[in-house]
Amino acid sequence: MAVESQTQSAEIHELSRDDIPRLDAIAARMRTPKDAEYFPRNFDFVEAGERLALVISHEDQDAGYCVLNWSPKYALFKKLDIPEIQDLSIIPAMRRKGIATALITYCENLAREKGCAHMGIGVAVNASSGPAQILYAQHGYIPDGNGVSYDRKLVAAGEFKPLDDQLCMMMVKALKF
């Protein structure tokens, strides 16, 4: 599907297990390689109909990817049937071109088509995720009010967790129809 970004058109495609080398190449370009089982594990869920794996191309090259999880493990999202955008990753040289916005909008539109009233997203609370925190807020995502989670489980007051990409603020947005 072609979508318009801030500068030029972008193409978003659903991926299959055969596209794992493509995802590995994007992760390597981002200098954030995943463990060998990360993408195959995601495609187990894709094949079960619980997730979509999406890639976005811009100017004829892969610019990033994300996962749209229809059955997230985060308890509030699960309870309220809120899908979650996960692992939204854009190659650094391709950032600030509307590419992440195009992926977010695409996921939100898919959720609307399925009748979902809300969309969820998690963002790491460390400084390296500052631009993502700002982007999500600009797109109407607000903290869900439950503090932070670690590996999608709420962190209790006084509990210690590492400050890594698993320590997240979970955010939600009401989708307008």
Image: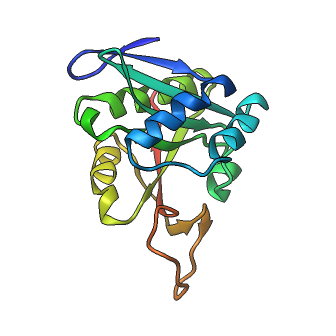
Q: Residue at x 30, y 44 (%)?
A: 135
**Between 138 and 90, the one nearer to me in the picture:** 90
In the depicted structure, whether residue 148 falls above or below residue 78: below
Colour scheme shown: rainbow
Does 33 sit above or below residue 165?
above
Judge from the rendering whether residue 144 lies leftward or rightward of residue 142; answer left or right.
right
Residue 111: image quadrant is: top right
- In the image, 89 versus 17, the foreground residue is 17
Estimate the x, y position of residue 175 in percent, counting from the top left.
47, 34
Which image quadrant is residue 169 in? Answer: bottom left
At horizontal 56% and vertical 75% (from top left) the residue drawn is 155
Residue 123 shown left or right of residue 149 in the figure: left
Q: Is residue 109 above or below residue 164?
A: above
Up-down relation of residue 107 to residue 162 (above or below): above
Number of numbered tags placed on the structure image: 0
Residue projecting furthest to the right = 48
Residue 42 appears left or right of 47 = left
Which is nearer the eye, 32 or 161? 32
Q: Is residue 127 visible?
A: yes
Q: Which residue lies at the image location 68% right of the left edge and 53% below the top edge?
A: 73
Residue 66 visible in the picture: no
Residue 94: % across, % down:
27, 32
Residue at 49%, 76% in the rendered image:
162
Most extreme residue toward the bottom is 158
Where residue 43 appears, as percent x and y from the top left, is 70, 34
The foreground one among 15 and 150 is 15
